Amino acid sequence: MLSENIKAIRKSKGLSQEELAIKLNVVRQTLSKWERGLSVPDSDMLVAISEVLETPVSTLLGENVAESKVDDLKMISEKLEIINLQLAQRKTLRRKILHWLLISLCVVIVTMFAVLIRLNSPYLGFDYNDPEEAVAGVVFHAFEWLFVRFAPIILIGAIVGSFLTWKKV
């Protein structure tokens, strides 16, 4: 609701994202995130947006309320609290997804090591006089060589990352 209102009011005032961003002293990407609902402005910035767009904060938040200022501030704080709760839930969900992706990466790397050990470098028995087998052997050897050197580093990083995200899941 807030994101749609900022965008609609900005367009109705004939301002581009860049122009509004300059007036608010933020980068255009920040304004774009607000308009797409990926983040929300803090209360001070919300007031600044309302001043630049010459629109009440309550209108930005989606209400046309003509109550006293105390009630306006209470409503704004309640809406911001809801928005902050939604952002916290989204952050928790992203952390859980990252945690399980890191665990999956660990499983894939360990599985690949098991497969490579089980295959026992089959390219050593290839007939390198045959061009197709020679190319396949070189490609397989290059993959194995790179995997054996970089996979342990990635595995350690994934294990550490999964432990760091585990405490917060």
Image: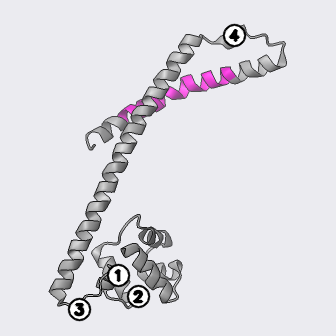
- x then y, percent, for residue 18: 52, 78
| Residue contact between numbered discs 1 and 4, judged by CB atoms under 8 Å | no
Q: Nearer the viewer, mark 1 or mark 2?
A: 1
Residue at 32% from the left image edge and 60% from the top image edge = 87
Prevailing secondary structure class for the magenta stretch in the rendered image:
helix
Look at the picture and state if 104 lies above or below 23: above
Picture disc at residue 169: none
Magenta-highlighted residues: 140-160
What residue is pinned by disc 4?
A: 124
Q: Earlier in the sequence, mark 1 or mark 4?
A: 1
Q: Can residue 69 be seen in the rendering of this structure?
A: yes
| Residue contact between numbered discs 3 and 4, judged by CB atoms under 8 Å | no
Q: Nearer the viewer, mark 3 or mark 2?
A: 3
Look at the picture and state if 96 lies above or below 55: above
What residue is pinned by disc 1?
A: 60
Where, by quadrant of the figure, is residue 130 drawn? top right
Residue at 51% from the left image edge and 82% from the top image edge = 19
**Amino acid under label 4?**
Leu
Q: Nearer the viewer, mark 1 or mark 3?
A: 3
Quick one: label 4, few (<14), some, or many (20+) residues within 10 Å?
A: few
**Amino acid under label 3?**
Ala
What residue is pinned by disc 3?
A: 66
